[in-house]
Image (tube, rainbow, N blue to C red):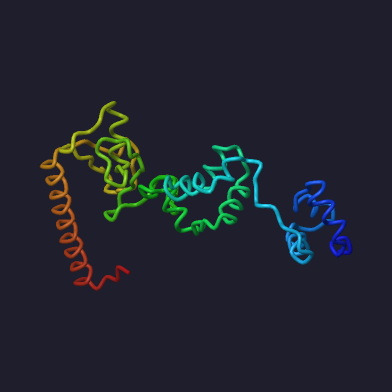
Amino acid sequence: MEKLKDKNWLKKKYIDEGMSMSQIGDLLGCTKHPIYRALKKHGLQARAHTSKYPLLNDKEWLRNEYLVEMKSIKRIAEEINAPHGVVHSALTHMGIKTRDPKESLAVKYQEGRFGNKASNWKGGRRMSGGGHVQIYQPQHPYATKNGLVMEHRLVMEKELGRYLEPEELVHHIDGNKENNVIENLQVVSRAEHVKIHFEAVGKLAEANKRIEYLEGLLKANNIDYN
């Protein structure tokens, strides 16, 4: 850029007319960096960095907001009504090391990332280790520490219009733990639940014995049942 080789022209624009390096760059169709190098080459003193946002010129204030108060660049920008990039540039110019993405997430989610803030959020539904559907409802009085409640209990509570007591269990009539329609659910006590499952095991054992008996009859009469 020929203009930058002309010390008098650059002095006139930068010192006499008070244009900024960015403004001169816009005039020449370049960034401010070639302007800075040209000023240095011609022995012209560059002005101290200033921002049109007064607080960003105060290093101690900016340092306190970013490093002590642990505010994000976005939050600082919103509070002084400035673009995010301007705040980032001010931090860099003042030698305040900006946080990397991992550190920024740790500041943003200081109490952890739960619910729809979690990176693996799937709408609040997940499967428990026992095969039940769980729903994310952290406001529920009996939610787990991760804010989860069994879906079948929520369905029954909606039907009853009240919270279930811890000793009240919800039985899946058809044995399918994922079938949480109200018609398939039944409120029982712990003792009743054990009895239901015990009887189911007994019926299954009887059915298996019956099958073995029938298979024996078929085999004795040389009947192929496959």
List x then y, in percent, for residue 159: 30, 29
List x then y, in percent, for residue 147: 32, 43
Residue visible at 79% across and 51% down in the picture? 15
Among all residues in the image, which is located at the extreme top?
A: 161
Closest to the observer: 14 or 201? 14
Residue visible at 43% across and 50% down in the picture? 107
Closest to the observer: 93 or 178? 93
Closest to the observer: 58 or 197? 58
The quadrant the C terminus occupies is: bottom left
Query: How many numbered circles are shown?
Result: 0
Residue visible at 36% across and 43% down in the picture? 136
List x then y, in percent, for residue 14: 79, 52
- The image quadrant that residue 222 belongs to is bottom left
Closest to the observer: 106 or 37? 37
Report the side of 36 relative to 125 (left or right).
Answer: right
Name above or below for residue 37 compared with residue 129: below
List x then y, in percent, for residue 41: 77, 67
Report the side of 55 relative to 213 (left or right).
Answer: right
Report the side of 166 relative to 29 (left or right).
Answer: left
The quadrant the N terminus occupies is: bottom right
